[in-house]
Amino acid sequence: MEKFWRPALRTCGIRHRDARQIRHTFATMCLMAEMNPAYVAGQLGHVEMFFRVYSKWINGTNNDRQQSRLDSFISENVTSLSQKARRQNK
């Protein structure tokens, strides 16, 4: 890898960094772009470690949207369950 890696970095004008640093940059950039964490973990090939290491980045600015999804789900399903219960009690 070094045979190609260092010359490629020099050609691109990028200071030397090892593959671990590149993977970390890729992972954090994907999460900051609000990509699906399961997809990103699959791309990197280490699902358990991905969630352990990058969990602090997963929430990002997405918390409000996620909470809204949960609220909608609960609202829709509580209404549906209430209607079913009323029908069964009649």
Image (cartoon, helix red, strand yellow):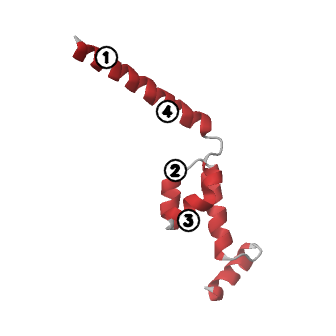
* Mark 3 / mark 1, whichever is N-terminal: 3
Q: Does 14 sit above or below residue 27?
A: below
Q: Residue at x 50, y 63 (%)?
A: 47
Q: Position of residue 72 (x, y in %)?
A: 47, 27
Identity, as a three-letter code, of the amino acid under mark 2: Asn
Q: Nearer the viewer, mark 1 or mark 4?
A: 1
* Mark 2 / mark 1, whichever is N-terminal: 2
Q: Position of residue 9 (x, y in %)?
A: 71, 77
Identity, as a three-letter code, of the amino acid under mark 1: Gln
Per the model, the C-alpha gap separating discs 3 and 4 is 26 Å
> Disc 4 designates what residue?
70
Q: Is residue 47 toward the left or the right of residue 28 in the image? A: left
* Mark 2 / mark 3, whichever is N-terminal: 2
Q: Residue at x 55, y 65 (%)?
A: 49
> Disc 2 designates what residue?
36
> Disc 1 designates what residue?
83
The extreme front residue here reads: 89
Label 3: few (<14), some (14–19) or many (≥20) C-alpha neighbours in 10 Å: few
> Disc 3 designates what residue?
49
Front residue of 13/59: it is 59
Q: Is residue 78 toward the left or the right of residue 14 in the image? A: left
Identity, as a three-letter code, of the amino acid under mark 3: Met
Identity, as a three-letter code, of the amino acid under mark 4: Leu
Q: Position of residue 61 (x, y in %)?
A: 65, 41
Q: Position of residue 27 (x, y in %)?
A: 61, 60
Toward which corner of the image does residue 26 lie, by quadrant?
A: bottom right
Per the model, the C-alpha gap separating discs 2 and 1 is 34 Å
Front residue of 28/55: it is 55
* Mark 1 / mark 4, whichever is N-terminal: 4
